[in-house]
Amino acid sequence: MAIFIFLVVSLIGTAWQLTTLTEISFWSVSPNLVLAVVLVGAILSHKSSRLAWLVFLPALWLDFLSGYPFGIMTLGFWGSFFLVDFLADRWIKKNDLSARISLLLIGVSFFEISQVLLSRLAFSFNLVPNFNFNGWLFPLTLAASLLMNGGLALVLLWLFNKSIFLNNYDQTIKIR
Amino acid sequence: MSQGHFSKNFYLFFVLAVILLLIFFNYLGWLSFPRNFIYRISTPFLKLFQSVDRQVAGAFDFWAELKNLNRENKDLGNENQKLLSENTKLKEVLKENELLRQQLSITLPEKEQLVLANIIGYTPQAGQYLLVDKGSEQKLKKGMTVVTDNNLFVGRLVEIGDRWAKVSLVLDSNFLVNALSQETRARGIVRGNHGLGLIMEMIPIDEEIKIGENILTSGINDQILSGLMVGRVVSIEKKESEIFQRAILQPAVNFNKLEKVFIIINPSN
């Protein structure tokens, strides 16, 4: 049941991402709810190992529904998750806010850079018609993304920490 | 390594294997069924959010634009006068054209068929793609031109499902379209400026181009119909040391307020 609820919620969240959130854009960067969920999932994955695959459901929906060649976004999400999860195991021994903020910023930066590199790779395999990268603009978009997505992930992290769903997640699965 | 770590790492690499497998399946074209299915179940949510957005944005825009109403009204009045005079001249030219066609026995080109589609979503990054609720069931094909009701150029279809299609927007920096200026006929290539507007590049330095001129699609080489308005020149960047100049364009379409688009089914398609 919990998985079904997460499936529906992630589908609604992805739809919200592709409509409302895209319209809120700053320096052509929009808040990426799915990225925020993936990063929060990576930080909290020590609470439940099943989160490691559950957070990829909205990522897959988004990749299916977005216009990019399939895989670019999901691989970027996976890489960010893996990196943040790896670093979180070493950094977050205590409930340290500055470590969490650093992890979120590293995750967002990794995702943005991975999108550029994977798009470049897709272009070399003729999966995208053109690859146009503006080196001057990228630091601005990265800054906007760090601000927006880092902030969004931080809020989500706080909410998830408070949520009953996460705290009882493993129990919910067992009951089912 | 603890049991928890092993379990999590196993899940992570299992997910990676699934992702790579899905990419491979997609490359082989085997994902069209799940993709269509996901579009179908997402469409009601996409439509719902889209309509809520429009209502909220509409109310917000009304209050935001209230203070500019006087000035806008004056500007529109002036533009209306200008358009009225242009319209009268064009009607005369149209009549003259018809007469000449009759005399020369030239038939009119076959009219294009238009398919009306609702916008149901955008990509996470602004100004790249949008999703519409019509697809191969309405005989849409890849590469078809997408316009607004006033024949303003929106983009091109890049992917088609049975009841959905993806439109690559002219605002996307990877989208290139051959264009020309309406008055001076200067040719160049228009591309998106990373979602921040439009740039017309590759305009030969000796070509004259004016601020305020309309930029139209030229229809050369890119399967996009000619004569569709792309934008208006707001500034020109010219350096004597370079062989090309470039123009910054104001997009003709207000993409934030776009709700419906038309897809042109070209008779040759």
Image (spheres, coloured by chain):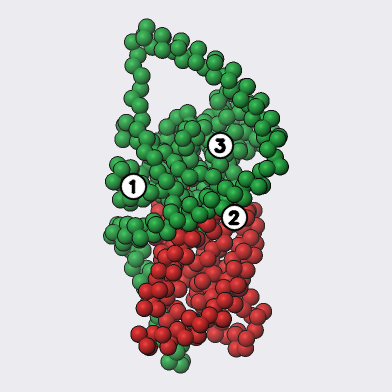
Determine whether the residue tagged by mark 3 lies in a helix, strand or loop. Answer: loop
Percent of width and height locating residue B178: 49, 35
Q: Give the chain letter for green.
A: B
Q: Is residue B113 above or below residue B62?
A: above
- On screen, residue A35 above or below B42: below
Chain A: colour as depicted: red
Q: CA distance from mark 1 to mark 3?
A: 25 Å
Residue B236 in view of the camera? no
Report the residue marked by disc 1: B135
Q: Is residue B93 visible?
A: yes
- Could you confirm whether marks 1 and 3 are on the same chain? yes
Q: Is residue B67 left or right of residue B146?
A: right
Q: Chain of mark 1?
A: B
Amino acid of disc 3? Ala
Q: Quadrant of the N terminus of chain A?
A: bottom left
Expressed as whole percent of the image width and height from the top left, the position of residue A94 reads: 62, 88
